[in-house]
Amino acid sequence: MVIALALGISTNYFAVLAFLPVAAGEVALTLQQFHAERWRMPTLRYAIRPRIWVGIVMAAAPLAFYRGLIRAGIATYAPHAWNKVSIDQAFDSYTEMVEAVLYPLLALFLLIGIVRVCSRFCTTCRAGLRPRALGDLATEYRMRHTERVFPTHELVAAFFLMLYPFLGYAVASIKGGMLSPRFVIPVCFGFAIAGIAAAHRLFGHMRYAAIIFLILFVAWVTTRESIIGYWYAEQKQSFYKVVNHLSTIADDQPIAIPDPLMVLTFQRYAPPSLASRIVFPVDFDAIRRFRGEDSPDRNLWTGRNSYYHVPIVPLAGFLQKTGHFIILGHDKNWMVQDLQEHRYPVDEIPINTRAGAIGGFTPLMHGVPKFYEASGDRSPASGYGQSATIIPFHGGANQPHEEDPKRPLQDLR
């Protein structure tokens, strides 16, 4: 447990939430011991397990070493993050992570609540007041009432796993300011455990119940994975449609890809003759104004000289060294709007890529791919140095910096 928790927070800081179900289950176990002793002080050796609490403290020790990294990460990515914390994300986490299985599980929990009420308060009800099947379940439930599917303290831990999205929302609201459904994916474990416990309590006496449940869920998993596999295959085809179209219009010009999702995929899977010409330009003021968030771009910028091998440069520097070039971006990408605002010549190339599926299950681009022809400072089309038609970019203004609310808009441009 110590190793798992310590490695968890060394992989993703939100794994700190995994400490809460363990702690809650341990508190529940201690309270059970006190209840068994009729709330008299039992022997501490039986009521409290010091090794568990010492283990929790030991597992949390790595956080002391990560405090600086956490603080720097929050300061860098939180101000303009795409996943700013909101209560809607907590609710979305259930539908996105547990997915469609959530609804039959909720129905199962509701059913066991009804059966429990019937077994306790409606034992003498007339048969007409409740369906026969429900009455049989209530009778069987009452007969098996003393049976424990899981120890109570383990069910408490499972309940805290089910609360994972709201626990994540609370932690992110206090510190961090960022939350994504995938951060709280252990919520699936909570619903799996609780669903098994509820199903066993209701249908455990039925001979073939386990086989029926197994068949249903295997069928669901197979269907779901087949659909996801089809989406991935469709996305792959869409990507290569974009690559094939690009190879027909880009002779030897540089290829600017302002979308952080597409640029890495393109570098990895496009032919070397195209991948070697791609550039990821940045203008953080424009990215924030036109897209509303810049955390993926900040990620690439931070690793521009180490993790990522694609050229990641300020837009001003790219334009100063470039003549004619191609832009691969979605229909409302920030770069086209930024260039048009600065009066640079930009024209859309009328090609229907038929690649709408490139969004996919895990998107490769923020929108539908489009191609554009544009001109840098070295192209006669821009008129740079010959007329005052364009508004030149400045490299220092393109780089990331903390926004000053008193800074005039014209300075940002």
Image: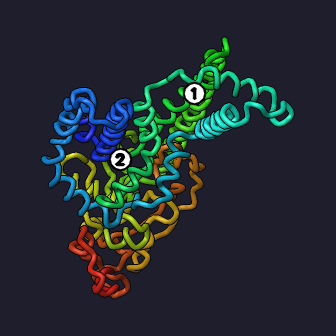
Q: Is residue 335 left or right of residue 359?
A: left
Q: Residue extending furthest right?
A: 128
Q: Where is residue 290 in the image (x, y as percent from the top left)?
A: 43, 71
Q: In terms of secondary structure, where does tag 1 sit? A: helix
Residue shown at 45% from the left, 64% from the top? 333
Q: How crowded is mark 2: few (under 14 residues within 10 Å), some or many (20 or more)?
A: many
- Alpha carbon separation for disc pair 1 and 2: 30 Å
Label for residue 264? 2
Left or right of residue 69: residue 231: right
Which callout, 1 or 2, points to the residue nearer the camera? 1
In the rendered view of the protein, which quadrant contains the C terminus? bottom left
Q: What residue type is labelled 1?
A: Val
Which residue is found at the position 15% from the left and 42% from the top? 61
Residue named by callout 1: 221
| Residue 22 in sight from this viewpoint | no
* Frontmost residue, 339 versus 411: 411
Q: Which of 256 and 123 is in front in this view?
A: 123
Q: Where is residue 334 in the image (x, y as percent from the top left)?
A: 42, 67
Whether 260 is drawn above or below 3: the answer is: below
Which one is earlier in the sequence, the residue at label 1 or at label 2?
Answer: 1
191 displayed left or right of 100: left
Is residue 307 among the parts visible in the rendering? Answer: yes
- Quadrant of residue 206 within the rendered picture: top right
Marks 1 and 2: CB-CB under 8 Å? no
3 relative position to 101: left or right? left
Residue located 18% across and 39% down the image: 57
Image location (x, y in percent) of residue 366: 48, 56
Q: Is mark 2 on a helix, strand or loop?
A: helix
Q: Amino acid type of disc 2?
A: Leu
